Image (cartoon, rainbow, N blue to C red):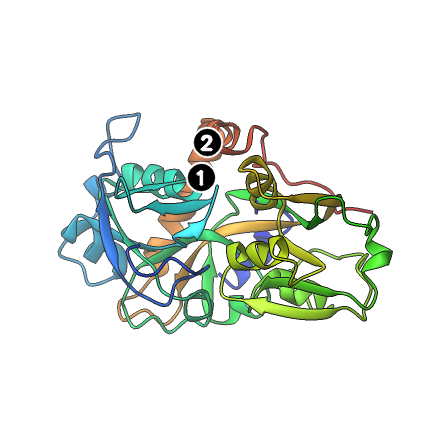
Amino acid sequence: MMRTSPVKGSVLLIAAFAVVASACASSSSSSTSAGGLTSPAGNTVCSSVDKSGTDLLAKICASGVLRVSTDPAYPPQSSYDQATRTWQGFDIDVADAIAKRLGVTVQWKTPAWGVITAGSWDGRWDVSVGSMTITKERAQVLDFTTPYYYTPAGLAVQKGSSITSFAQLAGKTVGSCGACTYEYYLERKLNIPGYSFQYVVPANVTIKTYNTDSTAIQDLVLGRLDAAMSAEPTLQEAVNKGKPIQLLGGPVFYEPLAVAIDKSAPEDPAGLTSRLDDVINDLHTDGTLTSLSMKWYHQDLTVSQPQAA
């Protein structure tokens, strides 16, 4: 999920309270998370914005709130702890860092993943900071910033499984999130501008989709799947938490992940997209994104990697 990036050229051109079940839960609940109000330099984007303007950036600056959609059940990227009523994860920290540079606070939204990627948000939230991959289809309805990191995609099987290679998945059932890059990869339809892929998973697998990766992983644990596909950090997090699964081979591809903005937002989103791109570049340059990646993934995923052979 992690990202100079070969995608940027095309980007510029085309540029939980609810039941926590999903990569995107079907709810649109919200909660406010306090973002800092000053950047390291003591200035913020909003301090130089005309708040009487009518575009989306002016509206956000005037309200003092950035409404961010993300997934309440996608650790370590993002999750909501009901016991402590707090959000945590890499995407959560990235969104807070963005809000700090803007000079606003974050209000979280949890719509279904398919609703987010479909665009036409009708002003219900402002941006998505949810490890979204820049695909050709999504770029028709969404604008993207420079990638803020690049994630390795992988597969897992049950611990002790007789399946020890990708080739042995032929004829097996593989689970993934629906309407996401992992489903598209398994279908051999994944299209990320500037990227090419070697499809190491056999074409004749049976694909079973879920509303979130966490549900697919749970079905793998229960023996309802032969394998599950997700971001390697998500699979490793499940292993670290004692789930009886194991990674199968290495990464099958890397994908660029970026902040997304609705092209058809009621207020003009162009200014917001441009300033967010500046903010992401600054967070790369000053090491903030690297630091957050090390915190949550124990490795720097903010640099683009070559595709797996």
Q: Disc 2 residue type? A: Leu
Q: Is residue 234 visible?
A: yes
Instruction: Reply above or below: 253 against 101.
Output: below
Residue occupying image coordinates x 58% and y 54%: 217
Q: Is residue 133 visible?
A: no
CB under 8 Å between discs 2 and 1 = yes
Q: Is residue 37 left or right of residue 302?
A: left
Q: CA distance from mark 2 to mark 1?
A: 6 Å
Is 282 or 172 nearer to us in this picture?
A: 172
Q: Disc 1 residue type? A: Phe
Q: Is residue 65 left or right of residue 26?
A: left
**Which callout, 2 or 1, points at the residue further toward the start of the chain?**
1
Q: Secondary structure at mark 2?
A: helix
Instruction: Reply above or below: 20 against 306.
Output: below
Mark 1 neighbour density, 10 Å: few (under 14) some (14–19) many (20 or more): many
x, y percent for residue 288 = 44, 29
Residue occupying image coordinates x 52% and y 64%: 14
Residue at image mark 2: 292
x, y percent for residue 202 = 82, 64
Q: Secondary structure at mark 1?
A: helix
Residue occupying image coordinates x 51% and y 48%: 146
Asked which quadrant contains residue 135, the reply is bottom right
Instruction: Reply above or below: 210 against 77.
Output: below
Residue furthest to the right in view is 167
x, y percent for residue 126 = 31, 59
x, y percent for residue 104 = 22, 43
Looking at the rendered structure, which numbered label has been put on residue 90? 1
